[in-house]
Image (cartoon, rainbow, N blue to C red):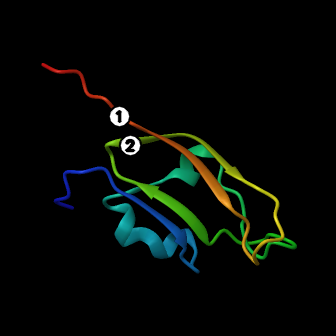
């Protein structure tokens, strides 16, 4: 809440988005604004349990879930850039 630096929190949360509510008070779910896709199980994805969350100093310009057999989860790639505020 008091962090001044940009924050990226990502990974396998093993939960639905509803269980992220405490984190979503401070961070944005990149999937909500960029087309959330299921990530688990990789062979037949039916659940979204892998997330990329970002602080307000950052913006997600793209989000992809890739097909892969490297894990039981599909990889998530987020394009993230800083939000520049005009100097007053």
The part of the image, by quadrant, that contains residue 69 is bottom right
Q: In this rendering, is residue 85 above or below 47? A: above
- Residue 71 rendering spot, x and y as whole percentages: 75, 75
Give the quadrant of the N terminus. bottom left
Q: Secondary structure at mark 1?
A: loop
Q: Secondary structure at mark 2?
A: strand
Q: Distance between the Cα atoms at labels 2 and 1?
A: 5 Å
Residue at 34% from the left image edge and 52% from the top image edge: 55
Looking at the image, residue 12 sits to the left or right of residue 20; the answer is: right
Residue underneath mark 2: 58
Residue underneath mark 1: 83
Q: In this rendering, is residue 40 above or below 86? A: below
For label 2, count other residues whose C-alpha is less than 10 Å away and answer few (under 14), some (14-19) or many (20+): some
For label 1, count other residues whose C-alpha is less than 10 Å away and answer few (under 14), some (14-19) or many (20+): few
- Residue 22 rendering spot, x and y as whole percentages: 35, 71
Looking at the image, residue 64 sits to the left or right of residue 5; the answer is: right
- Residue 51 rendering spot, x and y as whole percentages: 55, 64
Contact flag, marks 2 and 1 (Cβ < 8 Å): yes
The part of the image, by quadrant, that contains residue 72 is bottom right
- Residue 18 rendering spot, x and y as whole percentages: 51, 71
Give the quadrant of the C terminus. top left
Residue at 39% from the left image edge and 62% from the top image edge: 24
Residue reaching furthest to the left: 88
Residue at 45% from the left image edge and 58% from the top image edge: 53
């Amino acid at each position: 809440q008091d962090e001044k630096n940009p924050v990226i929190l990502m990974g396998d949360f093993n939960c639905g988005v509803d269980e992220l509510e405490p984190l979503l008070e401070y961070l944005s779910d990149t999937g909500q604004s960029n087309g959330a896709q299921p990530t688990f199980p990789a062979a037949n994805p039916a659940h979204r349990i892998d997330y990329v969350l970002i602080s307000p100093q950052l913006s997600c310009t793209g989000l992809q879930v890739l097909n892969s057999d490297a894990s039981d989860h599909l990889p998530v790639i987020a394009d993230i850039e800083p939000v520049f505020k005009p100097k007053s």
